[in-house]
Amino acid sequence: MGNSGVAVGSAGPLAQAIAAFRSSLRGWLTGLGDAAYDSARRVYNAMVDRRGRLIARCAGVADVMHCANFAREEGLPPAIRGGSHSVPGFGTWDNALVIDLGGIKGIQVDPARRVARVQAGCTWGDFDHATQAFGLATPGGLISTTGVAGLTLGAVSATSRGATGLRAIT
Ligand SMILES: Cc1cc2nc3c(=O)[nH]c(=O)nc-3n(C[C@H](O)[C@H](O)[C@H](O)COP(=O)(O)OP(=O)(O)OC[C@H]3O[C@@H](n4cnc5c(N)ncnc54)[C@H](O)[C@@H]3O)c2cc1C
């Protein structure tokens, strides 16, 4: 499969823009030609074989903002990736700037209010680990590596659904 992407280390105006973009991130950036690119582009469903132009592994909200600005300025379509479990691979697209949120894993549990605030890179395993420490739980994905954000936005079945019903209908 072809790709018109520019390697992070190559020369030219776009490469300069990419170098500046990379230096603005606390997380890491990879592109075609990098040793890390091929493993970074893979998603859970191995039948999905897409090649984003660049993949940014964000370390926090500021990185996401830099990604959104860079994508707008360079005319790159953004692809948002959480837990990478989308069966059709909706978290990655050819020639996109893949904004990988998987490293943003903050969770705050308020046991008095029985509320958990979960950042966009958390999986259901991360969520269960944090909430069970307080004796709390909520219906979630059956597989612990599924992303909380992607499942909440676009899926319907949940653990303990026999007792609690569907977690969400979108
Ligand atoms: C092994 C496996 C087990 C599963 N188990 C269950 C289950 O038990 N119950 C169930 O209901 N579903 C289940 N699913 C389906 C899964 O919930 C959905 O595919 C879900 O969308 C995956 O979310 P993700 O974040 O892991 O995936 P991703 O591929 O990262 O994201 C899925 C979609 O959500 C978007 N997205 C992710 N995060 C954000 C964000 N922060 N902001 C905006 N858009 C975002 C992505 O762009 C993409 O379109 C399972 C899938 C697999 C492969």
Image: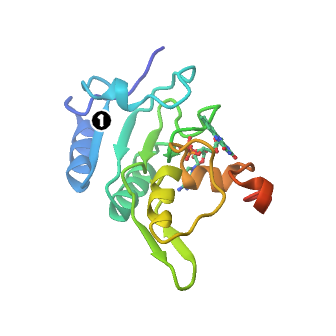
Relative horizontal placement of residue 160, taking residue 7 as reference (left or right):
right
The residue located at (50%, 64%) in the rendering is 132
Q: Which quadrant holds the C terminus?
A: bottom right
Residue 82: x %, y % from top left: 50, 48
Question: Residue shown at 20%/51% (left/top)?
Answer: 23
- The coloring applied to the image is rainbow
Tell me which residue sits at (53%, 45%) in the image.
144
Q: Quadrant of residue 129?
A: bottom left
Extreme residue in the top direction: 1
Is 123 situated left or right of 32 in this image? Answer: right
Q: Residue 68: where, in percent of width, then height?
A: 43, 56
Q: Is residue 169 visible?
A: no
Residue 134, given in percent of the width and then of the height, sits at 48, 72
Between 109 and 31, the residue placed more toward the observer is 109
Q: For the residue carrying disc 1, how many other residues have a C-alpha within 10 Å: few (<14), some (14-19), or many (20+)?
A: many
* 141 or 32: nearer the viewer: 141
Picture residue at 52% right of the left edge, 31% below the top: 44
Residue with the most extreme bottom position = 112
Position of 113 relative to 99 (above/below): below
Name the residue beneath numbered marker 1: 30
Taking 67 as reference, is 28 above or below it? Answer: above
| Left/right of residue 43 with respect to residue 39 in the rendered view | right
Query: Residue 72, percent across and down?
Result: 45, 53
Mark 1 CB lies closer than 8 A to ligand 1? no
User: What amino acid does circle 1 point to?
Assistant: Thr
Ligand 1, by image quadrant, is: top right
Q: Secondary structure at mark 1?
A: strand
Answer yes or no: is residue 113 visible: yes
